[in-house]
Amino acid sequence: MRSWKRGILIVSLLIATGWLCTGGCVTHSYWLLPSNSYGNDFKPYVRADVKCPGATYGTPYIYQYHGDRLPFGISLTYITHNVVEEPRITLDRVTIKLADGTETDLADRFREGIVPRVEEHWYIDDNHAMQKKPSLMSEVSIEDCVPNRNPFRLRI
């Protein structure tokens, strides 16, 4: 065997060994959520995040990728700077309308209402200054309510 062929073989074996030791080929995807501006009038802030349980697929050390498992859940966050005594949020309608036209009613999960807790809300305003305000905050999770990867519309 010629010396240049032996050199190529040794370099190839070193790269292949390093590839196997580091986990092989890994594919990774992520979602980037846009930042929201609160504005200057401090209206209630409502945010819905899709909760995707992670899963790892493929053959370890050969080809491995990270994805998510169905069904998905939704996490709702509500923040307001209007602090009142004995707060309660009543939701008359909570539905998920899927792209195929089916509509799922989730209002029965919130019949008794939601009681937000008093917290200090830290945020950066539109002038890039750190703000700290007393607020009411509520976080609610709805598990396993989005059955597939198609677009949907959440109505509250």
Image: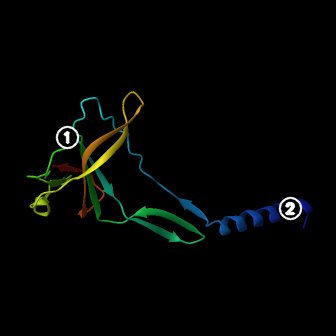
**Mark-to-mark CA distance, 2 and 1:** 72 Å
In the image, what residue type sits under mark 2? Answer: Gly
Residue neighbourhood size for the residue with mark 1, other residues' Cα within 10 Å, grouped as few (<14), some (14–19), many (≥20): few
Task: Write the residue at 32% across / 44% down.
Answer: 121
Indicate whether 87 appears above or below 130. Answer: below
Task: Write the residue at 12% across / 57% down.
Answer: 113
Horizontal side, residue 31 vs residue 64: left or right: left
Q: How many marks?
A: 2
Q: Residue furthest top?
A: 127
Q: Who comes first in sequence, dot 2 or dot 1?
A: 2
Residue neighbourhood size for the residue with mark 2, other residues' Cα within 10 Å, grouped as few (<14), some (14–19), many (≥20): few
Task: Write the residue at 27% across / 57% down.
Answer: 74
Secondary structure category for the residue under label 1: loop
Horizontal side, residue 57 vs residue 138: left or right: right
Residue 7 marker: 2
User: What colouring method underlies this structural image?
Assistant: rainbow
Residue 121 marker: none
Q: Position of residue 40 (x, y in %)?
A: 28, 29
Please identify the quarter of the rendering in which residue 144 is found. Answer: bottom left
In the image, what residue type sits under mark 1? Answer: Asn
Secondary structure category for the residue under label 2: helix
The N terminus sits in image quarter: bottom right
Task: Write the residue at 36% across / 66% down.
Answer: 69
Indicate whether 132 appears above or below 11. Answer: above
Q: Position of residue 35 (x, y in %)?
A: 37, 39
Marks 2 and 1 in Cβ contact (< 8 Å): no
Q: Which residue bears the numbered disc 1? A: 82
In-front residue for pair 28/1: 28
Q: Residue furthest front?
A: 85
